[in-house]
Image (spheres, rainbow, N blue to C red):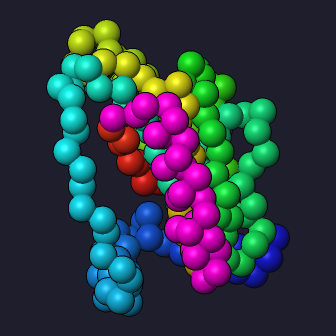
Amino acid sequence: MNLYRTWNQLKSKVYTRLPFLNELYGRLRARRLASDPPLPPLAPLGCPLNEARVALLTSAGVHQSDQAGFDMHHDLGDASFRVIAGQSATHDLTITHDYYDHSAADRDLNCVFPLDRLRELVASEVIGSVAPRHVGFMGHILGQRRVELVEESARAIADLFVTDDVHLVVGSPG
């Protein structure tokens, strides 16, 4: 285990036990990121919600158990992503991410990847369908890896959702 990873795991434990520090860090981090380019405008849904195909996108480090985990040893994080089959059972998914306390998600993955809740919304006719593919990646990406995430992975993810005719993407942090 490298020193950077150990430091991030320690911060995660401290922030979990002392939430006011997490809030302070968030405020300071927001100021530091104020120079980031603005987010693109949200697009209108384009169809009634009860006809929409919905996909999940999570930065919680979720992936299928048979897929390679995220690289937790690189100081700048892992800018790659994992495609998760829409028909996956939540017990066939796992989390590879050391930088947050995911003990609740380990008990019920729907905390960070609400796939079962989407299926319930389809059954209740609130949404039209669950997308055939979803995406998991890890948050806490820094430096050049952050550039790779935005310029390469994000484009590939958007293309995947367009190919799958996804109308709405639900984002979930870890």
**Along the line of sight, which residue is nearer the eye, 164 or 172?**
164
Residue at coordinates 58% horizontally, 52% vertically from top-left?
Answer: 156
> Which secondary structure is most common in the magenta stretch?
helix
Q: Picture quarter containing residue 62?
A: top right
Read off the magenta span.
143-167
The image shows residue 53 at horizontal and vertical percentages of 36, 26
Residue 48 at what x, y percent from top left? Answer: 17, 25
At x 60%, y 59%, the residue is: 153
Q: Quadrant of residue 64?
A: top right
Residue 94 inside the magenta-drawn segment: no
Residue 60: x and y, percent?
52, 51
x, y percent for residue 109: 50, 35
Residue 165 on the magenta segment: yes
Q: Quadrant of the N terminus?
A: bottom right
* Residue occupying the point 55% across, 41% down: 160
**Is residue 145 depicted above or below 51 in this figure?**
below
